[in-house]
Structures are given as C-alpha cells and as structure tokens.
C-alpha cells in the first residue's frame, strides 16, 4: 500500500531523532487524553485547517476517498467530539490506544511526516477486552510554538470488518 | 467485539429454540412479535430457504463497480457467497462462489479484473459466464488405468451454479429462483419511484466501502428503516436538524405486499417552527444545545426531482437505499446466523460531481456508516434488542403503535413493520 505524500525521504539523522522524540511524545499525550475519555479537548491536537480521516485499507488501496470518519477542519472535529460526548447513544466503553513502530518519513521546516502502527483495544460492559482495530497512522505534523499539531491524520485500518461500530476517536 | 467471540450467550445455547410444531405466532396476531423469529436456528434455516434462496430479488452489486469486461466483485445472496462479473458482451453474470468440483470458495478478492476464474485447489477453470472451460488431466495419464474423467464427462453439465440476474437503473439483482417477475414489478410502483430518483439515468461514482458485523438478527435492520417512530426519538441529529422530525412533512410508504418501504421526509426550512413545545417535550433527542461549529456538514444541495430531502428505502430482503440529503449509498444485509448480520455499505456520488460536491458528500457521510451519527446509534440499538430477546424468559415484543393498520402510514406508527410481518408470515407459513 502506498499513500501519496508518505514516501520515505532522506532525513538528516539528528533531525530524525528529534522528530521521533516529538512524535512519540505527541502520541503519548494524544492517546492519554482519549483513553481517559477527555474527548472535548481532542480538537486541541489539530490545526484549524486539518484533515482527519479514518478509513479501511480496502479503500486506501483502491484510492477510494470515503472516510468512516471524515473531518475537514478543526470545527468538524469539535462537532464530533460534542456529539460523542453529549448526544450520541451507545453502550459505555473504554478504549486503549497502543502506538508503535514510528517512522519519520520527512522533515521540512516546521513540518514532519510520520507513519506509526496502532492497535485499539475496546472493553464493553461485561465483555472481554478485544482488539477493535489494527491500523496505521499517516501523519503530517506542524510544529507551532514548540508543540506538534496534526495537519493531516489518515487512520488506515486493516480490520476491514468492524465489530458493530467505532464510536470513540482513533 | 464480534458475536462469535461474545461472552453473552455463546453459540449453541439457544434457550428459545423449540420443537418446530410449536412455533405458533401469538394469538394477538401482528400486535405481537415472538422473540423466536430473531433467535431460532430453525427459523433462520427456513428463512434462508424460503426467502433468500427463494422467490426474491437480492441486491448484489452496482453496475458501476464492474464497468469493464472481466471486472468482478465478491458478493452475497443471503449468506451465500457469489461472484458478480461483467462478461465480454457487456452483460452481468452472477454465479455461486463455489467450485463445481469439490465446493471450494475460489474467489478470494473483494474486487478485481480477470479473463477466467481458476479454482486454486485442482485448477478447474471457468469462463466469465461460469461455464467450465478446462480440467487438468481430464484425459488422465497415458498408460494408467482408471485415469482421468470418464469418457462421457461433459463440461457443460459441470459449470458453476448460475443465478437469475437483472439490472435495473444500474443496480444488479440476483435470484436463485428462475421464474421471477421483473425487478420493477417486484419493487412495485410506489417504491420504484424513489428508487428511480437515485439511480435512473445516473452514472455512479463509487466513493468507497464500510463493512461491519452487527450482532443482531437481519430482520431488525429491515424493521429499523420501516420504523419512523424510532427515527424521531433515537437520533439527535435527525430531529434537531429536521431531517426526520415529528411535525415536518413525512411519510412511511409501503409497497402493496408490505415487503419494501420508503421512509421519506422533507426538511422544513426552520425546524423550530415545526417543533412546538409539546412535540419537543416528547423528543428527548431534540437538543437545542446541539449546534454545529461547521454547518457545511448538513447543507442540502438540491439535485433531485423529488418532494423529499430524505428517502431511506428498504428493499426486501437484503438492500437499503440511502438518500439522506446529499449522502448516497446502498447497504447490503448478509445474514450470518440468527444472532448476527454482516452489513456492507457502498457509498457513491455521480460522475458529474465536481470535486467540491464529492467533498460535500464525504463530509456528509459522517451521518452514516458504523461511525456515523445516525448509523452507529442504529447498530447499538439493534445489538441491545438482540441481547434483550436472547436471555429473558419474556417471549414477545409489542407492535401496537398506529392500531391495526398495515402498510403506508404516518410517522408515529408501526404500520409498515406490521405489513412486513404479514408478508413474512405468508412466506414462512407461520
Ligand atoms: Fe435509525
């Protein structure tokens, strides 16, 4: 699978190390927030004009643009967070994100492109903890005031057949 | 969590299973639904034989998915895997995904293009019509006794099992039954009308797929979209933004047989004008605090010759046609045992769409699918219903809204669900 814009570029070793450190820090903070359920601050990880897509690998490989979640701009992220927090009907659940295999693909000025693997574990009331998704993040980060923000995040999951639904953010 | 690794009521412990002769519909008739139609293996098997493998037209593909000769798609009729393929002459063929030799499900790719199908096990080869072309060592090995196929073996008698196929407005239907009325007649005038609004004289552009396992009986999805009552109650996004709300112009249309339906609604210009304080009180999901930071999401760009801004169609037994503002799609129901179904969502636009229109449809797609603001709530509710009927000693649900009417009805009515079960009981002889 090739995602346009996420090819490996030559990156200076020192820049790559720094970028990796920052990206790993970012993942840890992002996952911590979501895993603890503070979804209303989710939008703070994004730039104003961000693009956020969750889609099956099946679609990515066939170059089909649909998103299971498709948010153009931070306002759409905010709207989703509000809906999930306040209006959506779904059974209580916990999610845990595990992110690994961070690859720094490109560093140019304030922009970092990276790829990481993720696993999502879900726990429902009186249910076992199950693997909800195995996927990959294709990220473009923008460094602003020393902090990374998501300019683009494509969450591409291998787990084509979703177990009923995906409610909480990836 | 998939239903096959659930800890709630694992497979093989079906407490509501009983002797076939005792499956008697409750005396109240259609005012009650017995739980066993959702939980029984015996009922499920009978449904597969009489409905999905019987005299029904089943959605299998959109023609836009297989535009060129040799394009194919894995699909299903009921739970049965089939292959849909475009032949050299431009026709569409549907056959079982089961090698005529030993039964191997030979086609393993969701989609692709090929000139022939080869079963990987013993390399039996089939053409795009499903006819058997070649068998390795058909004549055996020279000098070896009892080698190869018997001299009277005729390839023509050992092709793939072919299904009856008809395409209507670019939508491909298949049936195991030979003597079927034309699809247009099967749908009936009322349902065909809104079906044509979406498909007639349109070239589709496929935008992509969602797939999910839904741990609920397949009929619950047919019911869900013949149930306008739930739409006004469960879904905050529907009622708050006037997509389907008590007080606006709506209709639950059923075909004369009761199998199919169209849930239709016209969005009012100002929702607050149609929802008076009494109506608002009845609908907890009507949320004045739900305001969008990005209002592009729910814009409606007029593009249809129809009085409705929303039509959700249920086509018996396995298809949903979704026209929710400008987000378009079809859903295919693949029954997966009494307690489970697999849902395949194909989202599309039209080939005339500008890039901005495509993006509009993609943004609006957040309403639907297994993460959609409407889609996920239905999946949750259906799962809860299935869990409720599986484990309690109570044995029936109530279907009295709207009195005894069956068929086309209003929004606070279960008339269309009753009509569906009237037809179901006839076919199932229950
Ligand atoms: Fe619904």
Image (tube, coloured by chain):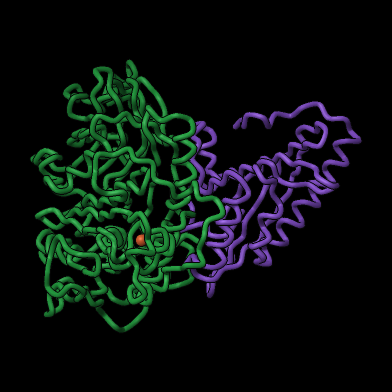
Residue at x 37% of width, y 58% of height: B270
Chain A tint as drawn: purple
* Relative height, residue A140 to residue B319 (above, below): above
Q: Picture quarter containing residue B249? A: bottom left
Residue B138 x, y percent position in the rendering = 29, 21
Question: Does residue B248 appear in this view?
Answer: yes
* Number of numbered callouts drawn: 0
In the displayed structure image, the side of residue B329 where residue A52 appears, left or right:
right
In the displayed structure image, the side of residue B195 where residue A78 appears, left or right:
right
Residue at x 19% of width, y 21% of height: B151
* Relative height, residue B52 to residue A122 (above, below): above
Q: Residue furthest bottom?
A: B393
- In the picture, which quadrant includes the C terminus of chain B? bottom left
Q: Which chain is green?
A: B
Q: Quadrant of ligand 1?
A: bottom left
Q: Please state which of residues A81 and B211 is positioned toward the viewer in this rendering.
A: A81
Q: Picture quarter containing residue A137? A: top right
Question: Does residue B218 appear in this view?
Answer: no
In the displayed structure image, the side of residue B17 where residue B366 appears, left or right:
right
Q: Picture quarter containing residue B394? A: bottom left
């Amino acid at each position: 699978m090739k995602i346009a814009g996420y090819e490996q570029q030559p990156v200076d070793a020192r820049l790559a190390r720094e970028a990796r450190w920052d990206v790993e820090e970012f993942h840890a903070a992002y996952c911590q927030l979501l895993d603890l359920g503070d979804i209303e601050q989710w939008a703070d990880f994004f730039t104003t004009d961000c693009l956020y897509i969750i889609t099956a690998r099946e679609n990515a490989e066939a170059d089909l643009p649909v998103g299971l979640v498709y948010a153009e701009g931070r306002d759409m992220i905010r709207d989703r967070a509000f809906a999930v927090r306040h209006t959506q009907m779904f059974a209580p659940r916990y999610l845990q994100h595990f992110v690994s295999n961070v690859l720094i693909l490109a560093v140019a000025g304030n922009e970092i492109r990276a790829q990481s693997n993720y696993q999502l574990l879900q726990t429902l009331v009186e249910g076992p903890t199950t693997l909800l998704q195995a996927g990959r993040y294709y990220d473009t980060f923008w460094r602003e005031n020393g902090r990374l923000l998501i300019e683009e995040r494509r969450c591409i999951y291998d787990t084509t057949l979703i177990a009923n639904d995906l409610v909480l953010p990836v | 969590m998939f239903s096959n690794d659930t800890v709630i009521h694992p497979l093989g412990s079906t407490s509501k299973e009983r002797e076939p002769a005792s499956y008697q519909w409750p005396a109240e008739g259609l005012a009650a639904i017995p739980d066993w139609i959702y939980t029984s293996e015996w009922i499920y098997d009978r449904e597969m034989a009489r409905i999905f493998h019987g005299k029904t037209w089943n959605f299998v593909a959109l023609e836009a998915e297989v535009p060129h000769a040799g394009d194919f798609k894995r699909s299903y009729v009921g739970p049965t895997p089939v292959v849909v393929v475009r032949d050299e002459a431009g026709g569409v063929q549907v056959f079982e995904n089961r090698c005529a030799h030993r039964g191997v499900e030979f086609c393993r790719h969701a989609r692709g293009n090929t000139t022939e199908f080869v079963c990987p096990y013993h390399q039996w080869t089939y053409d795009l019509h499903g006819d058997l072309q070649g068998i390795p060592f058909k004549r055996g090995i020279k000098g070896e006794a009892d080698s190869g196929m018997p001299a009277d073996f005729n390839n023509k008698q050992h092709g793939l099992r072919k299904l009856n196929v008809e395409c209507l407005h670019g939508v491909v239907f298949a049936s195991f039954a030979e003597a079927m009325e034309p699809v247009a007649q099967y749908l009936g005038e009322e349902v065909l009308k809104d079906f044509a609004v979406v498909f007639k004289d349109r070239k589709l552009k496929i935008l992509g797929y969602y797939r999910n396992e839904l741990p609920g009986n397949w009929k619950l999805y047919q019911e869900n979209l013949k149930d306008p009552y739930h739409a006004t109650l469960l879904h905050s996004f529907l009622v708050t933004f006037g997509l389907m709300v008590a007080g606006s112009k709506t209709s639950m249309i059923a075909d004369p047989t009761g199998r199919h339906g169209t849930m239709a609604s016209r969005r009012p210009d100002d929702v607050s004008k149609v929802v008076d304080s009494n109506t608002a009180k009845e609908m907890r999901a009507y949320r004045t605090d739900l305001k969008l930071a990005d209002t592009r999401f729910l814009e409606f760009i007029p593009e249809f010759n129809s009085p409705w801004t929303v039509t959700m169609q249920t086509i018996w037994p396995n298809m949903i046609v979704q026209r929710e503002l400008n987000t378009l799609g079809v859903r295919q129901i693949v029954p997966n045992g009494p307690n489970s179904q697999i849902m395949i969502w194909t989202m599309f636009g039209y080939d005339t769409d500008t890039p901005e229109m495509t993006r509009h449809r993609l943004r609006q797609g957040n309403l639907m699918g297994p993460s959609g603001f409407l889609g996920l709530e239905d999946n949750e509710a259906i799962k809860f219903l299935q869990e409720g009927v599986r484990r309690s000693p109570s044995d029936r649900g109530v279907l009295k809204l709207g009195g005894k009417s069956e068929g086309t009805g209003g929004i606070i009515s279960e008339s269309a669900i009753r009509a569906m079960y009237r037809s179901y009981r006839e076919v199932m002889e229950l």
